[in-house]
Amino acid sequence: MTLKKIFSGVQPTGNLHLGNYIGAIKNFVELQNENNECIFCVVDLHAITVKQDPKDLKKNIRETAATFIACGIDPSKSIIFNQSSVPAHSETSWLLSCIARIGWLSRMTQFKEKAGKDKEKASVGLYVYPILMAADILLYDATHVPVGEDQKQHLELARDISKKFNNDFNAPNFFKIPEPLIHKSFARVMSLKDGEKKMSKSETSDLSRINLTDDAETIINKIKKAKTDIDPFPNDVNNLNTRPEIKNLIGIYSSLTDMKIDLLLNKFNGKNFSFFKEKLSEVVVEKISPISNEIKRLGKDPGYIDQVLSEGSKKANELSSKKVRDLKEKFGF
Ligand code: AQP
C-alpha cells in the first residue's frame, strides 16, 4: 500500500467542537495510525482573518495543540506545529496569490458566509484565505488533505492553483495535486439548534455545539435541549433529508459508533426521541469525556505543549524551506 502524505489544519479560534472532531481530527488520528506521513498545523495565520484578542489567541494556540494530542495525535509520529512559526507559509501565500485568479476567489462560498452582508468591511485576509490554505498544503507536497465537507471548495482551489503553476512554469509535478479526504456518509456536523447551519466555534449560542472540553453533565444537557421535531423516530433513510435536525443527531450517533444508518434506524424503531437522546448522550460522553479530561490535564502543562510546537516547527521549517527556495527560483528570484 502506498503511504499518503497528509497535511491538515485547524484554526485556534476558540473551543474546538464535535464538528471539528468528526469532520477532521478523528480522521487525522486514523490516518496517523495507518502510518501515513502526517503534518497537523494549528493555523494561527488563518485565525487572524477575523479579529482575535492576542491573549486569547496565545491560549487558543496551545489549547488547539493540546486538543490534537488529547484526541490521539502522537507528536512522536506526526508533526504538530503552529503556522506563524514557519515563515514559508506567508511567503508562499504571496507567490501563489500571483497565480490564483480573482474570479476563482470570488466564487468561494465560505467568504460570502463569513463576511456576511457587509463584505466591504471584511478583511482582505478573509478573502484571500484559500490562497494561504493552498500554500499550507502545496509547500509540503501533501497528497491527501482530510477536511470537513465545508472545506471542499477551498481544496479544489488549491488543486487549480497547483495545476496552473505547473502549467504556467512548464514544471509538471512541481506541485502535487492534493486529494481531499472527506467522509462520504457524514462530513458536516450541524448546529444542535438549527439543522441548516453547521456547528461552529463562532456561533454565539454555546448550546448549538458540543465542545471537546464539555463535561458529561453539560453534554447531556445540550443533547436534551437539541432541536427535534414532532414526527416519530424515522424508520427510512430516505425520510432524513427533510428532517435536518434528526439527520444530524443520527449522523453523530452513527459516526461515533461506526454503526450504519439503516441498522441504527432499526435499533431505535418505535422508540421516542427522549430515549434516543439518552443513548446518544451516552455515546458522546463516552467518546468526549476522556478527550476533555486530557485537554484539562495538558492545560496544566503549557511547557510540554510549547516544546511539542517548537519541535514540530523545527521539522516543518526544514521541510518547507527547500520547497520555497525552489519555488522562488522558478519565478526567477
Ligand atoms: N460543523 C463541522 N462539521 C464537520 N467538519 C467541520 N469542521 C469545522 N466545522 C465542522 C472541520 O474542522 C476542520 C477545522 O476547521 P477550522 O476550525 O479550521 O475552521 P472552520 O471550518 O471555520 O470551523 P468553525 O468551527 O466554523 O470555526 P470558526 O467559527 O472559527 O470559523 C476543517 O477541516 C473543517 O472542515
Image (cartoon, rainbow, N blue to C red):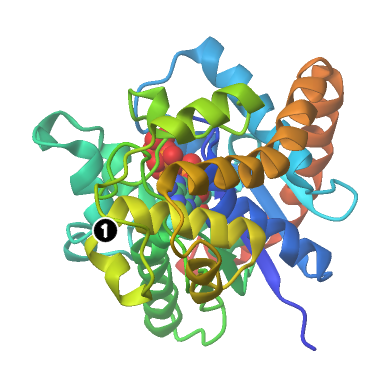
- Residue 136 placed where, x, y %? 54, 55
Q: Residue at x 50, y 69 (%)?
A: 182
Position of 2 with respect to 62 (left or right) is right
Q: What secondary structure is found at the residue carrying circle 1? A: loop
Q: Quadrant of residue 298?
A: top right
Name the residue nearer the viewer: 24 or 159: 24
Q: Amino acid type of disc 1?
A: Arg
Name the residue nearer the viewer: 234 or 2: 234
Q: Residue furthest right?
A: 76
Q: Is residue 10 in view?
A: no
Q: Quadrant of residue 228?
A: top left
Q: Residue at x 45, y 41 (%)?
A: 274
Answer above or below: position of 115 versus 134.
above
Q: Residue furthest front?
A: 270
The quadrant the N terminus occupies is: bottom right
- Residue 294 placed where, x, y %? 79, 30
Q: Quadrant of residue 290?
A: top right
Answer above or below: position of 100 versus 42.
below
Position of 96 with respect to 21 (left or right) is left
Q: Is residue 297 in view?
A: yes
Crowdedness near tag 1: few (<14), some (14–19) or many (≥20) residues, C-alpha within 10 Å: some
On the image, numbered disc 1 is attached to which residue?
243
Answer above or below: position of 20 versus 117.
below
